[in-house]
């Protein structure tokens, strides 16, 4: 019994993919304008520092002996004056790429105004608002990339497509935060209890939270591509991303080792 052979298109290698990316950017140089403007704003624009919040949090952690999962408190205190909440406009792992994230350079050509946040609730509200704006910029940025890679087709306008993509990104972020809350809160409770007996063991338990977060990021990583390039709904794009990682992650890892 003869089996029919399916013709598959070979996937491009790393160098060919990078070359295609450089070629696309060279043809459509305006694609780098948004990342360049964002980095320039982080570098030379006003800053929202949350130094007082970090200092109070560190002092509370030291007094209550709360485990910080191996975080060096001295390094954290040194970095506190260089924080900038505006950098949350570039959403980690997902948003418009930016070279400056959270920690800003100490010396700049200009002397930008620095506004310090003293309220944790104000920090949380501004972080939420800026993240929403960052996701909107992400929807616009990814939409521009898709528009540059293929001819615009008929149907919805670019602004309507960007708005719908923004809603999908909001849903993806909400799912991620919900999953992290479900995972991290029990770990935090167990870590606080263990801190009464063994701070080292408590830190190890708390450290499991960021590790699980990295795995979630890996499984969620290809969902935006499915939503923007293929127009998939949120749950369909997320399921395809999970299946893609499950199918190819181990084989790609073995090939990289070889």
Image (cartoon, rainbow, N blue to C red):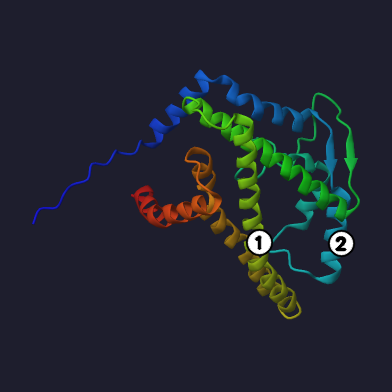
Q: Secondary structure at mark 2?
A: helix
Residue at 64 percent across and 42 percent down: it is 166
Whether residue 68 sits left or right of residue 154 in the image: it is right
- Can you give x and y, in whole percent of width and height, for residue 159 in the image? 64, 31
User: What residue sits right under mark 2 in the picture?
Assistant: 59
Q: Position of residue 186 (x, y in %)?
A: 68, 73
Residue at the image position 45 percent from the left and 31 percent from the top = 18
Residue under pointer 1: 178
Q: Quadrant of residue 111?
A: top right
Q: Residue furthest front?
A: 155
x then y, percent, for residue 106? 80, 35
Q: Secondary structure at mark 1?
A: helix
x then y, percent, for residue 225: 51, 42
Give the spatial CA distance, label 2 vs label 1.
29 Å
Is residue 154 something that shows in the picture? yes
Q: Is 40 rendered above or below residue 12?
A: above
Q: Name the image quarter holding the N terminus.
A: bottom left
Q: Earlier in the sequence, mark 2 or mark 1?
A: 2
> In this view, which residue lies farthest toward the bottom?
197
């Amino acid at each position: 019994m003869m089996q029919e052979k399916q013709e598959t298109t070979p996937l491009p290698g790393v160098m060919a993919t990078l070359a295609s990316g450089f070629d696309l950017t060279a043809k459509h140089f305006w694609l780098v304008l948004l990342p360049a403007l964002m980095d320039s704003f982080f570098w030379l624009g006003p800053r929202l520092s949350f130094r007082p919040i970090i200092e109070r949090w560190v002092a509370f952690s030291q007094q209550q002996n709360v485990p910080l999962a191996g975080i060096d408190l001295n390094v954290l205190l040194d970095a506190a004056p260089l924080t900038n909440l505006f950098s949350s406009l570039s959403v980690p792992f997902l948003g418009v790429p930016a070279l400056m994230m959270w920690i800003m350079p100490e010396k700049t050509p200009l002397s930008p105004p620095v506004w310090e946040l003293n309220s944790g609730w104000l920090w949380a509200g501004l972080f939420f608002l800026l993240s929403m704006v960052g996701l909107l910029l992400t929807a616009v940025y990814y939409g521009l990339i898709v528009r540059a890679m293929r001819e615009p087709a008929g149907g919805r306008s670019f602004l309507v497509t960007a708005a719908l993509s923004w809603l999908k990104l909001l849903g993806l972020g909400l799912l991620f935060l919900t999953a992290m809350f479900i995972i991290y809160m029990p770990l935090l409770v167990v870590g606080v209890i263990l801190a009464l007996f063994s701070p080292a063991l408590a830190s190890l338990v708390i450290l499991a939270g960021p590790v699980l977060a990295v795995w979630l990021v890996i499984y969620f990583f290809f969902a935006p591509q499915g939503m923007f390039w293929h127009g998939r709904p949120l749950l369909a794009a997320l399921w395809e991303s999970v299946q893609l990682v499950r199918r190819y992650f181990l084989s790609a890892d073995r090939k990289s080792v070889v």
